[in-house]
Image: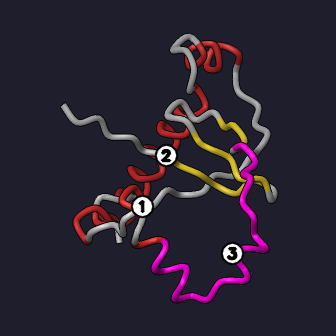
Amino acid sequence: MKTEHIIRVRDVGNVWMQEHPDGSLTPLPKGQTDWAAIDAKSEEQLLAEALSDPDALPLTDEQLARFERVESKQAVSIRLDEDVLDYFKAGGRGYQTRINAVLKSYVKAQTARRQRRA
């Protein structure tokens, strides 16, 4: 059975963060890339080296088609009734993602409702 790994990465205040399925974020580890050596190479050299690496072959059109655009999120402070927050937290990690999904569903329903009226 083939296991599929999806990694979502985003820039949060000039820090690259990995977004986990539960919505939590962790900083990506610092690399040890020799940027001066890379800058000294031509585009042709870099392309040849990249294509010679069997673990880093270019993605096919089919693979690229499976990518999904992830909307960026904005950190906000919001006041919720205690019972509402307790309900979502009772579901475990990812409660903020679940709250966002409920709000997104509401926005979608209201938008459709307004379009039907127009």
Q: Are marks 3 and 1 in contact (CB under 8 Å)?
A: no
Foreground label between 1 and 2: 1
Crowdedness near tag 1: few (<14), some (14–19) or many (≥20) residues, C-alpha within 10 Å:
few
Q: What is the spatial separation of the Cα atoms under label 1 and label 2, in whole angstroms?
A: 16 Å
Residue sitting at x 55%, y 79%:
46
Instruction: Please state which amino acid type lies under the numbered disc 3.
Output: Ile
Instruction: Please state which amino acid type lies under the numbered disc 2.
Output: Ile
- Residue picked out by circle 2: 7
Residue sitting at x 61%, y 89%:
42
Magenta-highlighted residues: 29-49
Q: Are marks 1 and 2 in contact (CB under 8 Å)?
A: no
Labels 2 and 3: the sequence-earlier one = 2
- Residue picked out by circle 1: 56
Residue 44 against residue 68 in the figure, above or below: below
12 magenta-colored: no
Q: Check residue 9 in the rendering and tell me which mark sits there, or answer none.
A: none
Labels 1 and 2: the sequence-earlier one = 2
- Residue picked out by circle 3: 38
Instruction: Please state which amino acid type lies under the numbered disc 1.
Output: Ala
